[in-house]
Image (cartoon, rainbow, N blue to C red):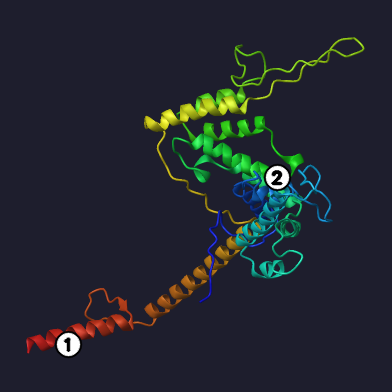
């Protein structure tokens, strides 16, 4: 009887689609692979080549990783055995979360088989492609049009949940193009001002307030302390301090409390997340409008044709001598009238 081993998945399997899905896959591997062995090192450490005894692709000690002494003794032998186990377990963890059969077939052969770090390097090389300008534009459009209701819905923890979503979306952008905490806070304020009549005024006031000395009229409530640069070593006047940045942590905590209280009091209605319908691209929209215009023209031609036929039928109808006005009726009307007279005649008999 064959022996089967079930491996519990920590997250959904990945189909090897490059780009953002690949970045999410890497993040999931590192986040969910944090369970440590008795030496204190995890699967994530092993995949990243930062666990004890880790080596680089050439077999040399990995920079920054703890080394295992070469001396042969019980303690060092156990460290090496744990390292071998970690390498094999990291391979199993990686492959279990891949659904692409060709990739799994490739990883079943050396040098990848049962070598988690080597297999991880190969997979990442295949899926972590740079973000091009078109993809970056799409990310920015998503950032500017996202709403609280479409991602997390309205509940007591909507503010905290939305900030987490924003941080994840921001991490998927290239490092030089990522938004700062201050920009994340501004986008959060903008969404609240448009989606909650209960908190709209407060969010708008904070969004439109100026940087300046705290406590002054028209100045932001949530700002980081001003950093005063030290005077130059050679003497002279110190450079002016940079503007105070918005304080995301303090602002998030404040808005979370107000939002949660609003939901509890019924001033903010609880609603499940409802992703917006996907908008058609311009080319598709243009094609749809052209199709609609063509359909309208066909319907008009068909209507004119039917009207013409009806007019001809009226002109070619027979005279109804029983009417005082002598109006004309079509053949169908005559047939119906004949049937009626026959029915009345039969009933008279």
The quarter in which the C terminus is drawn is bottom left
Residue drawn at the location 66% of the way across and 13% of the way down:
213
Q: Which mark is residue 95?
A: none
Task: Give the labeled residue for mark 2.
Answer: 173
Residue drawn at the location 53% of the way across and 75% of the way down:
2
Q: Nearer the viewer, residue 233 or 248?
A: 233
Name the front one of labels 2 and 1.
2
| Picture quadrant of residue 293 | bottom right
Q: Residue furthest left?
A: 349
Q: Residues within 10 Å of mark 1 (few under 14, many from 20)?
A: few
Label 2 vs label 1: CA separation?
Answer: 85 Å
Task: Give the labeled residue for mark 1.
Answer: 342
Does residue 262 appear left or right of residue 24 in this picture? left
Residue 253 drawn above or below residue 141: above
At numbered mark 2, what does the secondary structure look like: helix, strand or loop? loop
Residue 296 horizontal/vertical position (percent): 53, 65
Residue 316 horizontal/vertical position (percent): 38, 82
Q: Earlier in the sequence, mark 2 or mark 1?
A: 2
Q: Residues within 10 Å of mark 2 (few under 14, many from 20)?
A: some
Q: Residue furthest right?
A: 234
Residue drawn at the location 42% of the way across and 29% of the way down:
262
Q: Nearer the viewer, residue 348 or 193?
A: 193
Residue drawn at the location 40% of the way across and 76% of the way down:
310
At numbered mark 1, what does the secondary structure look like: helix, strand or loop? helix
Q: Is residue 199 visible?
A: no
Q: Nearer the viewer, residue 254 or 42?
A: 42
Residue 304 drawn above or below residue 86: below
Residue 160 horizontal/vertical position (percent): 53, 35
Q: Is residue 157 visible?
A: yes
Q: Residue furthest front?
A: 73
């Amino acid at each position: 009887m064959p022996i089967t081993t079930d491996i519990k998945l920590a997250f959904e399997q990945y189909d090897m689609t490059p780009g953002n899905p690949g970045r999410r896959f890497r993040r999931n591997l590192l986040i969910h692979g944090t369970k440590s062995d008795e030496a204190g090192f995890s699967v994530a450490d092993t995949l990243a080549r930062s666990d004890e005894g880790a080596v680089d692709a050439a077999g040399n000690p990995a920079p920054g990783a703890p080394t295992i002494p070469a001396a042969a003794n019980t303690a060092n032998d156990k460290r090496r055995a744990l390292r071998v186990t970690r390498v094999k377990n990291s391979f199993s963890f990686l492959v279990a979360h891949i659904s692409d059969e060709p990739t799994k077939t490739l990883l079943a052969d050396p040098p990848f088989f049962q070598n988690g770090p080597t297999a991880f390097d190969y997979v990442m090389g295949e899926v972590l492609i740079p973000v091009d300008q078109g993809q970056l534009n799409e990310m920015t459009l998503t950032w500017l049009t996202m709403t609280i209701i479409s991602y997390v819905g309205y509940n007591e923890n909507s503010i905290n949940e939305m900030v987490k979503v924003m941080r994840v979306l921001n991490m998927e952008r290239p490092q030089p193009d990522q938004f700062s905490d201050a920009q994340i806070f501004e986008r959060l304020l903008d969404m609240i001002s448009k989606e909650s009549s209960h908190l709209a005024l407060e969010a708008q006031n904070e969004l439109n307030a100026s940087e300046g000395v705290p406590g002054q009229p028209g100045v932001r409530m949530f700002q980081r302390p001003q950093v005063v640069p030290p005077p130059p070593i050679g003497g002279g006047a110190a450079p002016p301090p940079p503007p105070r940045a918005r304080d995301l942590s303090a602002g998030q905590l404040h808005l979370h409390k107000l939002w949660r209280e609003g939901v509890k009091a019924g001033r903010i209605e609880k609603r499940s997340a409802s992703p917006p319908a996907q908008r058609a691209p311009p080319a598709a929209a243009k094609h749809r409008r052209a199709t609609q215009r063509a359909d309208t023209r066909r319907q008009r031609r068909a209507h004119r044709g039917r009207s013409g036929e009806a007019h001809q039928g009226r002109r070619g109808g027979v005279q109804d001598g029983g009417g005082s006005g002598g109006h004309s009726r079509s053949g169908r009307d005559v047939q119906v009238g004949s049937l009626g007279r026959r029915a009345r005649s039969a009933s008279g008999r």
